[in-house]
Image: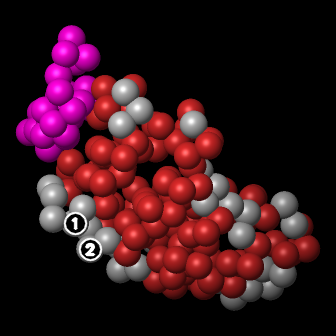
């Protein structure tokens, strides 16, 4: 019964070696609506990356159900888009897209040139979910530079193009050399 554990114990469990323990702790903290605790853990660069990732996911669980705290929380999560850990940058991009964080658009565009293909993938998907029409040249440029060798990036690019809902913009690619 995870409801018997203290908040301190649950936060420690977020970095536990057993994934099942980490998830149970994450879900319990989210169930308790421990948003401030999860946010503080997620953005603390001195903590274990795995624990921070679970804290980010727990925060996202709360944001899905509580739109009143969404904007302030997303603003606090934006620094994760610049985190040194590529997995956290990618996860933060995913959250920004799924929670429609328009304040993250500029950074998401910058992440198109991130050295990590995982980060690029989630950035393109986030820009698609945010329907950022202005990112069109950057997304196309990223896809061209991938030389059609990365199926995940190609998928993200397709999702981005579909999100545009602008056949004229897509038609401009008809004569594109790639």
Callout 1: helix, strand or loop?
loop
Compared with 118, 135 (above or below) is below
In the rendered structure, find residue 45 and report the number of the disc placed on it. Answer: 1
Magenta highlight range: 1-25
Numbered disc 2: secondary structure:
loop
- The residue sitting at 32% across, 32% down in the picture is 29
Residue 164, image quadrant: bottom right
Residue located 54% across and 56% down the image: 72
* Drawn side of residue 176 relative to residue 168, left or right: left
Q: Residue at x 61, y 60 (%)?
A: 101
Return the x and y of residue 92 as percentages of the image width and height. 43, 59
Q: Nearer the viewer, residue 88 or 12?
A: 12
Instruction: Left or right? Give the position of 111 relative to 22.
Output: right
Mark 1 or mark 2: name the one nearer the start of the chain.
Answer: 1
Q: Is residue 29 above or below residue 56?
A: above
Badge 2, how many Cα within 10 Å: few under 14, some, many 20+?
A: few
Q: Residue furthest bottom?
A: 177
Residue furthest toward the top?
1
The answer to the question of whether label 1 and label 2 lie on touching residues, with beta carbons closer than 8 A, is yes
The quadrant where residue 27 appears: top left
Evaluate whether residue 99 shows in this view: yes
Q: Which residue is mark 2?
A: 84
């Amino acid at each position: 019964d995870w409801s018997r554990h203290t908040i301190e114990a649950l936060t420690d469990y977020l970095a536990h070696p057993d994934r099942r323990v980490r998830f149970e702790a994450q879900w319990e903290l989210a169930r308790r609506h421990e948003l401030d605790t999860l946010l503080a853990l997620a953005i603390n660069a001195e903590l274990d990356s795995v624990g921070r990732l679970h804290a980010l996911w727990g925060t996202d669980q709360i944001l899905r159900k509580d739109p009143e705290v969404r904007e302030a929380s997303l603003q606090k999560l934006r620094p994760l888009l610049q985190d040194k850990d590529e997995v956290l940058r990618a996860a933060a991009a995913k959250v920004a897209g799924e929670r429609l964080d328009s304040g993250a658009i500029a950074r998401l565009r910058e992440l198109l040139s991130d050295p990590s293909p995982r980060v690029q993938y989630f950035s393109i998907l986030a820009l698609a979910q945010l329907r950022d029409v202005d990112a069109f040249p950057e997304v196309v440029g990223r896809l061209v530079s991938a030389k059609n060798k990365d199926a995940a990036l190609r998928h993200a690019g397709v999702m981005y193009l579909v999100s545009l809902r602008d056949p004229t913009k897509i038609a401009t690619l008809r004569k594109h050399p790639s």
